[in-house]
Image: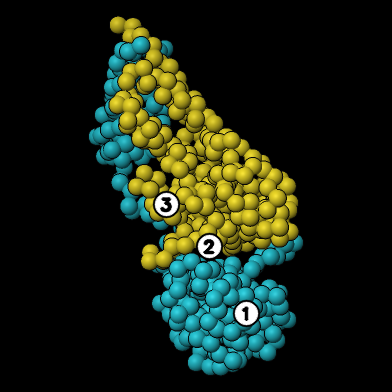
Chain colours: A cyan, B yellow
Amino acid sequence: MNPPIIVLVRPQLGENIGKAARAMLNFGLTEMRIVAPRDGWPNPSAGPAAAGADIVLDRAKVYETTAEAVADCEHIYATTVRKRGVTKPVVGPDNAARLMHTKAGRHAVLFGREASGLATEDVSLARHILTVPINPEFGSLNLAQAVILTAYEWSRIARKTGADSDLVQPTAEEELLPPAPQAELDGLVDQFEEMLRPRGYFLPEARADATRQTLRSVLTKPGWNHLEVRTFRGILRTLGRERRD
Amino acid sequence: MNPPIIVLVRPQLGENIGKAARAMLNFGLTEMRIVAPRDGWPNPSAGPAAAGADIVLDRAKVYETTAEAVADCEHIYATTVRKRGVTKPVVGPDNAARLMHTKAGRHAVLFGREASGLATEDVSLARHILTVPINPEFGSLNLAQAVILTAYEWSRIARKTGADSDLVQPTAEEELLPPAPQAELDGLVDQFEEMLRPRGYFLPEARADATRQTLRSVLTKPGWNHLEVRTFRGILRTLGRERRD
């Protein structure tokens, strides 16, 4: 799976370190590295903000410099809001995630301090710039949000299996009951017809076939499963009863 | 582009409404609807948390019920952390975004209150369940995070619409009429209920709500267009008549 390492460079607030940990663990990332945290480490405000993602904080390693933090990593991404010239390839979270799943070696993503982002020397360590494409008139992503989008994409691409995952299809459709067999649907259509005919629904006779077609196509569209067909037949039986009031 | 409408159902904290607005605007979403906000509207804590996304808050509309909030929408998604049974197709933010870009009609995404999420009756309004696939051992997404992942995916897929390979080719279904607005579907459901109640369909009373949910789910599944809904209402009127034989 090759999960990326999330590197927080000179973070200011312990609360934001906790929120980043929470964002990571939601999508299965557990390895955090912290470079020169302003308020030291451990930080008492990190735990509460992590909302239970303590495993990430407990395992977090602290380094003095960014270079030391990524010394054992083969692929380094520097997250920036703006593209720094054209000196390095710029990727979004989705393409970064694809690289993580296709390129062997350890991948590390650098996130800068809340106020000022990454310093130029941090960016110089990276082979890729990771930029979340945001609204040019309103760019306001905080640290935890940048982390969660990166973690989400890594997890999303990890679950993808080939091209068909790009098709529009409910991810859990397999879990749904299959449509009822045609015989059950016919039974429902017949029941409708038996109830509708004596009430004149298929008159005038000249239109009867077209009306029957419409009825069938409306009832065919849902692809009801056999439980749903059974529910509908119960509804029809009920409608056939006399009112009780 | 067909941007989705973000519907916050009974949100508790104004701060979270503001954070949701900020999350939306980062990815170009501007239409927010708020159902029965606990602390009323406008809410003084929303503005500061929006961090400049005032345009979203200023345009936000408030409704008393979820049904009213989505009455003019053709495609409704209910965000839940867990899958509610197997009655509706479940999509992730990526496939939901693809549906938004391929299906004609207005798309609305329902987000529940911070503490408890969406109520069953809110979910019953939706044709799709939107679930962010998260770490089964640690699921801790807050409201703004769920909103930002939805907005991010809509924006990501929007930027890809040039690349046909990434988007599903519209099928014949897309050329057909879009599903009827929620208000028309509600009319059909009401008509069913009016006819079924006096015939004892909702008895025993203890099961009435569950029975009503089942009825709505079965009727929501087809995504009938307004002609089909009209056909069905004609069928029901007919079934209400006396037999002629």
Mark number displayed over residue B165:
2
- Place of residue A122 in the rendered image (x, y in percent of width and height, measured from the top left): 65, 87
Mark number displayed over residue A179:
none
Q: Is residue B178 placed above or below A121 in the rendered structure?
A: above
- Is residue A186 visible to us here? no
Name the residue tied to disc 1. Answer: A11
Q: Is residue A200 placed above or below B174 in the rendered structure?
A: above
Mark nearest the camera among 2 and 1 is: 1
Element class at badge 3? strand
Q: Is residue A151 placed above or below A222 in the rendered structure?
A: below
Q: Residues within 10 Å of mark 2 (few under 14, many from 20)?
A: few
The three-letter code of the residue at mark 2 reads: Ser
- Is residue A26 visible to us here? yes
The three-letter code of the residue at mark 3 reads: Val
Mark nearest the camera among 2 and 3 is: 3
Q: Are marks 1 and 3 in contact (CB under 8 Å)?
A: no
- Place of residue B101 in the rendered image (x, y in percent of width and height, measured from the top left): 57, 52
**Separation of disc 2 and disc 1 at Cα?**
40 Å
Foreground pick, A155 / A38: A38
The three-letter code of the residue at mark 1 reads: Pro
Sequence order check, earlier mark of 2 and 3: 3
- Place of residue B64 in the rendered image (x, y in percent of width and height, measured from the top left): 59, 35
Q: For the point 45% across and 85% down, which residue is it?
A: A104
**Separation of disc 1 and disc 3 at Cα?**
37 Å
Chain letter of disc 2?
B
Chain letter of disc 1?
A
Foreground pick, A51 / A225: A51
Q: Is residue B61 placed above or below B157 in the rendered structure?
A: above
Name the residue tied to disc 3. Answer: B90
Q: For the point 68% across and 57% down, which residue is it?
A: B50
Q: Quadrant of the C terminus of chain B?
A: top left
